[in-house]
Amino acid sequence: MAFKFIETVIPEVIMVKPKVFEDERGFFLESYKKSDFIKAGIYKEFIQDNHSRSVKGVLRGLHYQLNPKAQGKLIRCIKGKIFDVAVDIRENSPTFLKYVAAELSEENKFMLWIPEGFAHGFLTLSDEAEIIYKVSGNSYSPEHDRSILWNDPEIGINWPLEGEPILSKKDREAPLLRYAEINFVYDGR
């Protein structure tokens, strides 16, 4: 298998470690292989690839799309380093409001699978960072796009910040979770 799938404190959020072949020329890795993801039980049909670049201190999130346009994401940092976060926002979930945080970087080449029903955000730790991510479920839908305030005390994410983050207007004005529109319900699977 070209990947090691590592369970996190929230079983549905999976750290994916690709097998990397390195030598004096550089490296090679498979960043996705449908058959391996099916065997790991986390396969979704990916319908969109996104690429994002951010400078140090940029914090993006916490973002999600409402049902019926929800999205799953397979996040990978290809340049620099980020602190990546997935927050469980599924009502009745045993891990509701818990989060998984992971450092993703061009050095470690790890990926994070974030299924539907989770809010996603990241903080750029290096001078600049580029992430690419595969999206499952649905394409971007502005009318279903939602956010939760990045520093909501009810969630309590321990962001490794040096000073104040650089935020978009959307992220600065995001509501606290208690006022956010959420329509995800844990289904017991």
Image (spheres, rainbow, N blue to C red):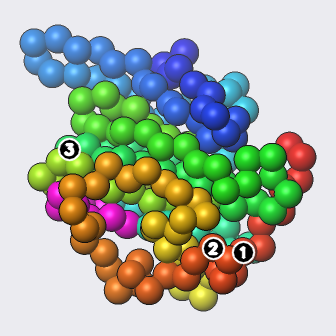
Tell me the distance, in whole angstroms, between the alpha carbons under discs 1 and 3: 32 Å
From which residue to which does the magenta span run? 52-60
Say which of 82 and 134 sits in front.
82
Res 80 label: 3
Q: Residues within 10 Å of mark 3 (few under 14, many from 20)?
A: many
- Give the SS element for disc 2: helix
Disc 3 marks which amino acid?
Gly
Q: Which residue shows up at 48% across the image and 35% down it?
A: 32
Tell me the distance, in whole angstroms, between the alpha carbons under discs 2 and 1: 9 Å
Which mark lies nearer to you, 2 or 3?
Answer: 2
Q: Residues within 10 Å of mark 1 (few under 14, many from 20)?
A: some
In this figure, which residue is indicated by the disc labeled 1? Answer: 182
Q: Position of residue 86 (x, y in %)?
A: 55, 52
Q: Which residue shows up at 20% across the image and 44% down it?
A: 80
Query: Is 182 above or below relative to 8?
Result: below
Q: Quadrant of residue 12?
A: top right
Q: Quadrant of residue 178?
A: bottom right
Q: Position of residue 171 (x, y in %)?
A: 41, 78
Tell me the distance, in whole angstroms, between the alpha carbons under discs 2 and 3: 30 Å
Which mark lies nearer to you, 1 or 3?
Answer: 1
Which quarter of the figure is the C terminus placed in? Answer: top right
Q: Which residue shows up at 33% across the image and 19% down it?
A: 20
In this figure, which residue is indicated by the disc labeled 2? Answer: 177
